[in-house]
Image: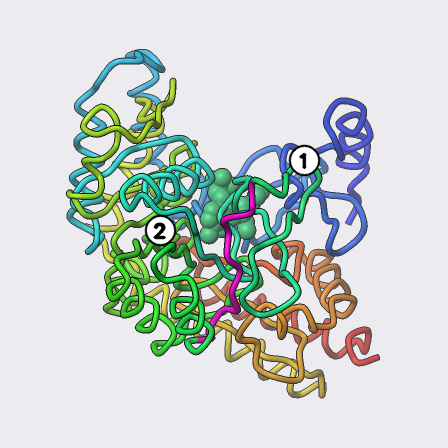
């Protein structure tokens, strides 16, 4: 495939934007080479500047569960735009979207709309601290909640240590009250609460992790979180920016039957426009200004275009229930990839939940960050490039999940599996 126009566009972008991108996830850092620049997208397809078509399993990192440019979503955004793009004043669309979210997500009685998952997670953490009057926040290695200073922490020296910054610009002070634990480790959760319980404001967790690749929170882990936070009066926050409206219409909390106190949403809920949400128990949410004293604000929060896209998207998901079909094509892809890797004798493990999954190049199950980090990322890179050359666009990192949409067909899944089989058979992955 020729990608000369992408190459030229990237050369120009690098003179204007750090690394030539507006988010590092797009820079192909995990697979080498240069990112592809796209002109348009439709249904399950992306079309690059050079006219190449790709079957898209990134879907804007999750939002496009209906497929790209869904006509009803586009019409809703066009209609809203003609009436003005932002008022900085209340609109009924914000209440309509709020009602859809409250009806769908078990933990949510009230919501606040913001502009990104990062903003939603940051606000939920501040709210947990404001509501409890306590300082400590627990997070898990391998979980990502956006670029919130206090949540950009690396593992400390032992299992339950106060975090150390994992980015320049994040100060020791910013992470002093962040406790980093191992994902899927109920004993570690119990130990942390025995040691710090009375000081823990909240726990934030991806109930289905997507940011170390797809790793599902085990029932005993999620119930330990629910039990320990209840026992110690801490706030349980489910970060469902990725899993929300994806693994079920009500998110992981509906799928697993574990109800947090607060939920963070993004991606799908905005239909591909900038929108994040935090919401949960009324008695907690009513601490947010101006109902309460916990400050949070935003010029474009709940803006007419993002709410129009979100309302249209959630109504289609609610009324058409694509989840059984998504489950079927996701399982078909997962088992097909497992079969292709096994036939080639390539060590592998598949993490899958609903319409998100990851093929890990690992000889053992991937259940936490340590086992994810041990994956053969060079082999992943060869797999990624083998597929992109065959018109299949995967997330450009072993530590991301791939996503399916209601626009993906069984025939396209089978074509993907045929391409994967070729990539595995051509030997590049067997070295
Ligand atoms: P945003 O600020 O990017 O809208 O959301 C941050 C966020 C919060 N929580 C979870 C579970 C997330 O997955 C994300 C963002 N996910 C990444 C992909 N792994 C977005 C891609 C990017 O950063 O460009």
Image location (x, y in percent) of residue 68: 45, 42
Nearest the eye: 235 or 104? 235
Picture layout, residue 411 above or below residue 6: below
Q: What's drawn in magenta, residue-wise? A: 174-185
Nearest the eye: 303 or 253? 253
Rendering quarter of residue 161: bottom right
Residue at (30, 22) in percent of width and height? 304
Q: CA distance from mark 1 to mark 2?
A: 24 Å
Q: Earlier in the sequence, mark 1 or mark 2?
A: 1
Nearest the eye: 203 or 80? 203
Which numbered disc covers residue 169?
1
Do tag 1 and tag 2 residues touch (Cβ < 8 Å)? no
Q: Is residue 110 magenta?
A: no
Q: Quadrant of the C terminus?
A: bottom right
Picture layout, residue 402 above or below residue 426: above
Q: Is residue 213 visible to the viewer in this orientation of the structure?
A: yes
Q: Is residue 176 magenta?
A: yes
Residue at (31, 43) in percent of width and height? 133
Q: Is residue 100 left or right of residue 73?
A: left
**Element at badge 2?**
strand
Question: Mark 1, mark 2: which one is toward the viewer?
Answer: 2
Which numbered disc covers residue 195?
none
Residue corresponding to mark 2: 201
Image location (x, y in percent) of residue 339: 58, 84
Image location (x, y in percent) of residue 202: 36, 53
Q: Is residue 44 visible to the viewer in this orientation of the structure?
A: no
Picture layout, residue 428 above or below residue 23: below
Rendering quarter of residue 90: top left
């Amino acid at each position: 495939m020729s990608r000369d126009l992408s190459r030229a566009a990237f050369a120009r972008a690098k003179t204007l934007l750090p690394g030539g991108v507006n988010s590092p996830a797009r820079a192909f850092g995990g697979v080498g080479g240069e990112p592809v620049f796209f002109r348009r997208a439709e249904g399950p397809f992306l079309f690059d500047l050079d006219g190449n078509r790709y079957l898209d399993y990134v879907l804007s990192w999750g939002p496009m569960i209906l497929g790209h440019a869904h006509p009803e979503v586009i019409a809703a955004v066009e209609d809203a735009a003609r009436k003005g793009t932002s008022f900085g004043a209340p609109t009924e669309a914000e209440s309509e979207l709020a009602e859809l979210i409250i009806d769908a997500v078990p933990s949510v009685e009230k919501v606040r709309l913001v502009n990104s998952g990062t903003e939603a997670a940051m606000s939920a953490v501040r709210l947990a601290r404001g509501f409890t009057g306590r300082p400590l926040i627990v997070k898990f290695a391998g979980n990502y909640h956006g670029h919130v200073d206090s949540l950009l922490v690396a593992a400390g020296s032992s299992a339950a240590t106060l975090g150390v910054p994992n980015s320049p610009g994040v100060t020791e002070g910013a992470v002093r009250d962040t406790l980093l634990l191992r994902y899927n480790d109920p004993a570690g959760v119990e130990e942390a609460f025995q040691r710090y319980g009375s000081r823990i404001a909240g726990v934030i967790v991806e109930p289905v992790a997507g940011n170390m690749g797809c790793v599902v929170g085990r029932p005993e882990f999620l119930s330990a979180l629910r039990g320990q936070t209840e026992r110690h009066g801490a706030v349980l926050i489910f970060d469902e920016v990725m899993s929300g409206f994806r693994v079920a219409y009500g998110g992981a909390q509906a799928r697993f039957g574990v109800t947090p106190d607060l939920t963070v949403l993004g991606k799908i809920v905005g239909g591909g426009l900038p929108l994040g949400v935090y919401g949960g128990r009324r008695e907690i949410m009513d601490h947010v200004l101006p109902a309460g004293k916990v400050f949070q604000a935003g010029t474009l929060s709940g803006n007419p275009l993002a709410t129009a896209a979100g309302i249209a998207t959630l109504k289609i998901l609610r009324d058409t229930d694509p989840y059984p079909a998504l489950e079927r094509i996701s399982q078909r892809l997962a088992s097909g990839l497992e079969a292709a890797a096994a036939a080639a004798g390539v060590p592998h493990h598949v993490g899958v939940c609903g319409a998100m999954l990851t093929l890990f190049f690992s000889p053992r199950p991937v259940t936490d960050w340590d086992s994810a980090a041990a994956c053969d990322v060079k082999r992943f890179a060869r797999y990624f490039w083998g597929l992109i050359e065959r018109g299949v666009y995967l997330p450009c990192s072993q530590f991301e999940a791939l996503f399916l949409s209601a626009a993906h067909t069984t025939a396209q899944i089978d074509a993907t599996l045929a391409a994967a089989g070729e990539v595995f058979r051509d030997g590049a992955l067997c070295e």
